[in-house]
Amino acid sequence: MSEEQSTQENQNNVPQEKLKASEYFKLGPVFSYWFRKKDPNRPNNFNIRMMHGINKISMLMFLIALIILIIRRLG
């Protein structure tokens, strides 16, 4: 019963704003991830560089696959 009360309190206290459709398709953070300047305060070690490299490769592969699916669907 306490869980139900806490969820009701959270729903009542936090104003929920509906997002517009244009806010779902903002690509600014994606492009800033690809084309950002190096931050001297950010830690720079091998593991983090490899993690970001793999993330960039996986995003690129996803975008290519998405483009191929759209082309096949339209064609």
Image: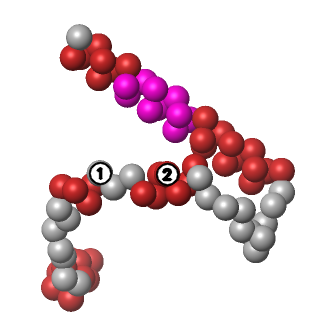
Residue 12 located within the stretch drawn in magenta: no
Circle on res. 74: none
Q: Is residue 38 visible?
A: yes
**On the rendered image, what quadrant is the C terminus found in?**
top left
Disc 1 marks a residue whose amino acid type is: Phe
Residue 42 spot, x, y in % from top left: 74, 69
Q: Which residue is mark 2?
A: 31
- When the figure is inspected, residue 39 is found, relative to residue 9, above or below; the finding is above
* Residue depicted at x 18% and y 76%: 16
Residue 64 part of the magenta-drawn span: yes
Q: Looking at the picture, which amino acid does disc 2 mark?
A: Phe
Residue visible at 20% across and 65% down in the picture: 19
| Residue range of the region highlighted in magenta in the rendering | 58-67
Is residue 5 visible in the rendered structure shown here? no
30 is higher (above) or lower (below) than 64 = below
Specify the quadrant that holds the N terminus.
bottom left
Mark 2 or mark 1: which comes first in sequence? 1
Q: Residue furthest top?
A: 75
Q: Main secondary structure of the magenta part?
A: helix
Residue 25 marker: 1
Label 2 SS: helix
Looking at the image, which is closer to me, 13 or 28? Answer: 28
> For the residues carrying marks 2 and 1, which lies nearer the camera in this image?
2
Q: How many marks?
A: 2
Q: Residue at x 46, y 32 (%)?
A: 62
Label 1, residues with CA under 10 Å away: few <14, some 14-19, many ≥20: few
Q: Name the image quarter holding residue 71.
A: top left
Q: Position of residue 47 (x, y in %)?
A: 79, 50
Q: Where does the image place residue 45, in percent across and percent down from the top left? A: 83, 57
Name which quarter of the figure residue 55 lies in.
top right
**Residue visible at 29% across and 51% down?**
25
